[in-house]
Amino acid sequence: MHKLFPECERLRVKERLTLKEIHQRTGVAPSTLSKWNRKSNWDARMNDWQNSSLHIAERLQFLLNQELQDVEQLDNKAVDKVIKAVKSIRYLNQDADILGNTIMVMEQYGTFLQLKSAKMFSEFQNILPDFLVHMREKFKKQ
């Protein structure tokens, strides 16, 4: 497997870049990116990641950091927003959903396998999309 696969996958799933943008950043051929996208089900995984509690917590943390750029100028309304954001981040981090965690673990496991065994990594890539679909159906939020 191509050494840039994990980076391309991250750019698509977590950063939501288009295949064209990934090609421009990495130089990986568009046809290769399209094949990886299809075989590894990046689009569905991107949607799962976007809806995961872990991603929402990360986004809230980013917004909170922006709000706190100039702490001395915070008024009561801004302080209330910060308190609510901190509470939300704590809640989301404690209650990170199973799908978000599954995606994170599978990404790490895939990277590990890629370094250890090309054959096992290839088998992993073939079965991963079906496993993620299974997990999405089994643990779909009501």
Image (spheres, grey):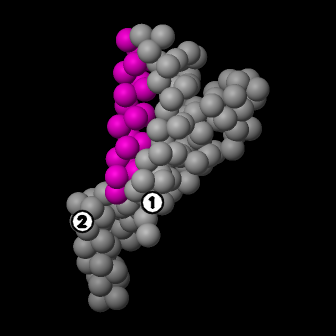
Quadrant of the rendered image containing residue 107: top left
Q: Can residue 23 be seen from the camera position used here?
A: no
Q: Quick one: 89 or 122, which is closer to the camera? A: 122
Quadrant of the rendered image containing residue 52: bottom left
Secondary structure found at label 1: loop
Q: Quick one: 130 or 27, which is closer to the camera? A: 130
Task: Look at label 2 and name its amino acid.
Answer: Arg
Q: Can residue 90 be seen from the camera position used here?
A: yes
Q: Residue at x 70, y 24 (%)?
A: 32
Find the residue positioned furthest to the bottom: 76
Q: Are marks 1 and 2 in contact (CB under 8 Å)?
A: no
Q: Residue at x 42, y 42 (%)?
A: 103
Q: Which residues are magenta?
A: 97-116
User: Can you tell which of label 1 and label 2 is closer to the viewer?
Assistant: 1
Residue 49: horizontal and vertical position, in percent? 48, 52
Q: Is residue 142 left or right of residue 93?
A: right
Q: On the image, numbered disc 2 is attached to which residue?
A: 90
From the viewer's perspective, is residue 47 above or below residue 108?
below
Q: Residue at x 38, y 11 (%)?
A: 116
Q: Tell me the chief SS of the magenta region.
A: helix
User: Across the whole image, how many numbered discs are drawn on residues?
Assistant: 2
Q: Is residue 118 left or right of residue 37?
A: left
Task: Check if residue 111 falls in the magenta segment.
Answer: yes
Can you tell which mark lies on residue 140?
1
Other-residue count near label 1 (Cα within 10 Å), few / some / many at <14 / 14–19 / ≥20:
few
Q: Quadrant of the C terminus?
A: bottom left
Other-residue count near label 2 (Cα within 10 Å), few / some / many at <14 / 14–19 / ≥20:
few
